[in-house]
Image: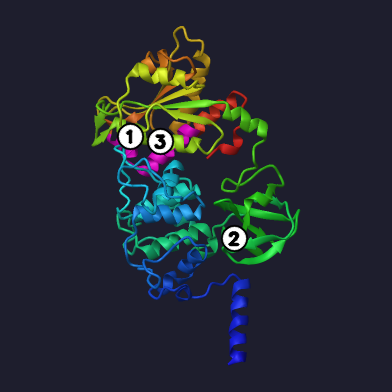
Amino acid sequence: MKKWTMFITALCLVFSLLGIQAPVQAAGFNDVPSRAVKEVNYLTQGKIIYGVTPSSFAPGATLTRAQVAIFVGRTLQLNGQQRATRFSDVGKGNTASGYIEAMVDKGIMLGTSDNRFFPSKAVTRGDMAIILQRAFGYSGNAEQALLKLGIASGMEDGTFGTNKTITRADFAVFLARAVNPSFRLKQSASFESALVSTTNNLNIRTGPSTDYTSIGKISANTKVSGAHSVGGWTYIKAGSLTGFISSSYLRSSSGSTAPDAPAPAPSPNTDSALAGQTIILDPGHGGKDSGAVGNGLKEKDVVLKAGLQVSSLLKGTPFTVKMTRSSDVFIELLDRSAFAKNEDGDIFVSIHANAATPAATGTEAYYYSAGNQHVADSKLLGEKIHARMLAAWDLRDRGTKPGNYSVLRENSMPATLLELGFITNAGDAAKMASDAQMNKMSIAIYNGILDYYKAKGFSVDAYYK
C-alpha cells in the first residue's frame, strides 16, 4: 500500500509539472461531461469558476448575466468587491455587484438606458461571443472571430446558434479556450511580440494567476515571444515552454508589440500630459426628448450606449473623461455647454443619430466655424473621428462640415458633433441595433479622439484599440 501511495503521488507530480490537469471530479464535481472536463478543471484551479453545489457543476444549466460577469471578471482580475451599482436591479448585496460594475466600467457588458442590468437573464451564444470579443480584444465580427481562432464551433445546422442560450459547460469551454490557446480546436496563438524578462527565478505558469501550476522558471534578460495578455499576465513562449508570465516582469526588446500583447508603459511625462486633458462626452437628447425615432430605435438610447462605451474605453487611459449624461435624463442644450465649461473641458464630443427619408444614409461630423478661436482644432477633431467612423461602418461619406448647433456654438473648446448614421434608414439602423457594430463604432470614436491628440503632439500610441 505504501508503494502504491508513493506511485500515485509521483504520478500526480509528473502531471503537475507537465501542466496536465487531473479529472474535474478531483475538484469535487461529479456531473461534468467528458468534453468539458479539462476546461472546467482548468478554470476551477484558477478560482475562476464554481459549481452550484460543492459536488455539482450543473453543466447543462443556462448561464446568467451575473454569473458571466463573475467568471469573466475573475479571469481578468477585476475588482469584484461587492458595492453599490448604477443599476436598479443589482443591489450592493448581490454577489456579482462588484464584478458587474467593473465589467460595465470596462465596456465589456452593458446595461439599459433605464439603468437595469437584468442579472438573471440567460446568456445566448451571440451574447457570449460579444462579451469574449470585448474582454479579449478580438477585432471584426465577434462570432467569426471566435470561429477563426478555434474558440467556438458552429452548430450542427451550420449556424453559430446566435440566439440559443449557452450552457454553463459550453461557456466554461469557450472561456478556457480564450484564455489558454492549448485548449483551442486549432493552433491560433501568434507569438509576435519580442519581450525580455526583467527578474530572476520568474515562474512560467499554466494560467494567468499564481493559483496556476509553475511549469518552469527563467532568469533575468531571457528573450521570450509574447502572444496575448489576460488580466496582467502574458501568454509567452520561452524555448520549449509555453505558458503565462506576469506582465510586470516583461519589457519590450524591440520597441514594438503585438496588438494583443501588453504595450510598454508610457513615460511619466506622457501620462502626466494626458491626465491633464479632460474629454467631455455628450450623448444627445435623453429623458423626455427621445431624439430621432426609426426602425424600432430611439436616438437617445443609441447615443447613450455609444457614449458609455467610449467613456469606458477612455477610463483605461490617463485622460479625465466626463459625460453630460450617463443615464436617461433630459438636459437642456445650454446646460450641456455650461457643463463642459465648468468641468474645464479640453475637447467636446457630442454623439447623435440622423433622421430623414428612409433612403438617406451615411456618417458625418460638424464643427462651428463662425467667430470661434477653436475652428481649426474643432475641424481637426471632427475629421479625425469621422475618418474612423467611416472605416468602422463603411457608410456613405457625408463629410466633416460647418454646423450652427448650440452645443458647438456655445462652447469654449474644440468641439464636434457626430452623426453615426440615419436611424430612419433600415441598413444604418441595423448597425445601431447590433451590439457588435455599436462596439465597433465606439472603438472608432475612441481611436479618433486619440488620432486628434496624436496630431496635436501627444504620445498616445500605447492606448490604441
Q: Nearer the viewer, residue 166 or 325?
A: 325
Q: Which mark identifies residue 386?
A: none
Label 3 amino acid?
Leu
Q: Is residue 55 visible?
A: yes
Q: Is residue 459 visible?
A: no
Task: Please say whether residue 443 is one of the residues in the magenta stretch.
Answer: yes
Residue under pointer 3: 308
Q: As drawn, is 453 to the left or to the right of 204?
A: left
Disc 1/disc 2 C-alpha distance (Å) = 41 Å
Mark 1 vs mark 2: in front: 2
Count of picture labels: 3
Q: Quadrant of residue 102?
A: top left
| SS of the residue under disc 3 | helix
Q: Earlier in the sequence, mark 3 or mark 2?
A: 2
Disc 1/disc 3 C-alpha distance (Å) = 10 Å
Q: Quadrant of residue 421?
A: top left
| SS of the residue under disc 2 | loop
Label 1 amino acid?
Val
Residue under pointer 2: 210
Mark 3 nearby-residue class (10 Å; few <14, some 14–19, many ≥20): many
Q: As drawn, is 214 to the left or to the right of 298?
A: right
| Segment tinted magenta in the rendering | 426-446
> What residue occupies the far top of the structure in this picture?
371
**1 and 2 marks in contact (CB < 8 Å):** no
Q: Is most of the magenta stretch helix, strand or loop?
A: helix
- Picture coordinates of residue 334 (x, y %)? 36, 16
Q: Earlier in the sequence, mark 1 or mark 2?
A: 2
Q: Which mark identifies residue 302?
A: 1
